[in-house]
Amino acid sequence: MAELVFIGLGLHDEQDMSLRGLSEAKEAESVFVELYTSLMSGLQTEKLGRLIGKKVTQVSRRALEDESGTTILQAAMKGKTVFLVPGDPMIATTHIDLRLRAEERGITTRIVHGATIVSAVCGATGLQNYKFGRSVTIPFAYKGCTSDRPYEVIKHNLDDGLHTLCFLDLDVEENRYLTLNEALESLLNIEKKKPKFTISLDTFAVGLARLGSSEQVVKADTVKRLRAHNFGSPPHTLIFPGKLHFMEAEALITLAKAPHRIRNQKR
């Protein structure tokens, strides 16, 4: 039977995969993994293979995007194939494209969901999921220039009292990861060029690092203080909270060591 099962690996290492995902992988004839859409700082392909008891073939961005996942689809046509991805399988649009291509070929597809940063930030900070607005990625600077889009998204969300989840750009294959400090510098530079009184050194934000690991960091404070904080190795994530519910404020004080004055924060 032609079958392709997408399995989410979760946030940090091979132990984050669900029992259902592990069972599906053990039953598969072919197992593939991609590790370029997100960084799982504790994951080692060799350990993943030993856990599953099968060879795990790592595929590159080129194999998925430029070659349309042909290798995976060909394997799925021959029998049950598993595709392991960081976080939750369908957060990355490239995976949606692969699923549609599989269905067009008559390959049955299924999903085994995994933990994702989108939901993990709520548990780590106490911010309420339904109060998040549009998410955005803060990209690397290109030839010294930065995109204004993240700044505009943050401003729009703040104007509506909503939180903004900012993903920080990464290139796993080149071992490049945008840090919190670099992301904040980028936004402050945009504020200087096009001042809309959105992001300053006094703006309240939340920095997160290595969620799901035993060394995760969650820190809420002003941009000025976050820039001076050592968040350690990647991956990093950034949140700009909007209007806080009193329970969210208490959670940030307790879980992220936010200053007590946020109880009186108004936007």
Image (cartoon, rainbow, N blue to C red):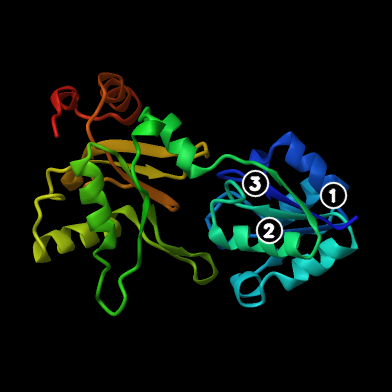
Q: Amino acid at mark 1?
A: Gly
Horizontal arrangement in the rendering, residue 258 relative to residue 201 (left or right):
right
For label 2, count other residues whose C-alpha is less than 10 Å away and answer few (under 14), some (14-19) or many (20+): many
Spot occupied by residue 226 in the image (x, y as percentages of width and height): 24, 45
Is 49 located above or below residue 213 in the figure? below
Is 68 located above or below residue 138 in the figure? below
Which residue position holds label 1? 53
Rounded to the nearest whole Å, what is the CA distance between mark 1 and mark 3?
Answer: 18 Å
Q: Amino acid at mark 3?
A: Gly
Spot occupied by residue 156 in the image (x, y as percentages of width and height): 23, 49
- Residue 232 visible in the picture: no
Spot occupied by residue 159 in the image (x, y as percentages of width and height): 18, 43
Q: Amino acid at mark 2?
A: Arg
Horizontal arrangement in the rendering, residue 132 relative to residue 87 (left or right):
left
- Indicate which disc residue 99 carries: 2
Question: Disc 3 on helix, strand or loop?
Answer: strand
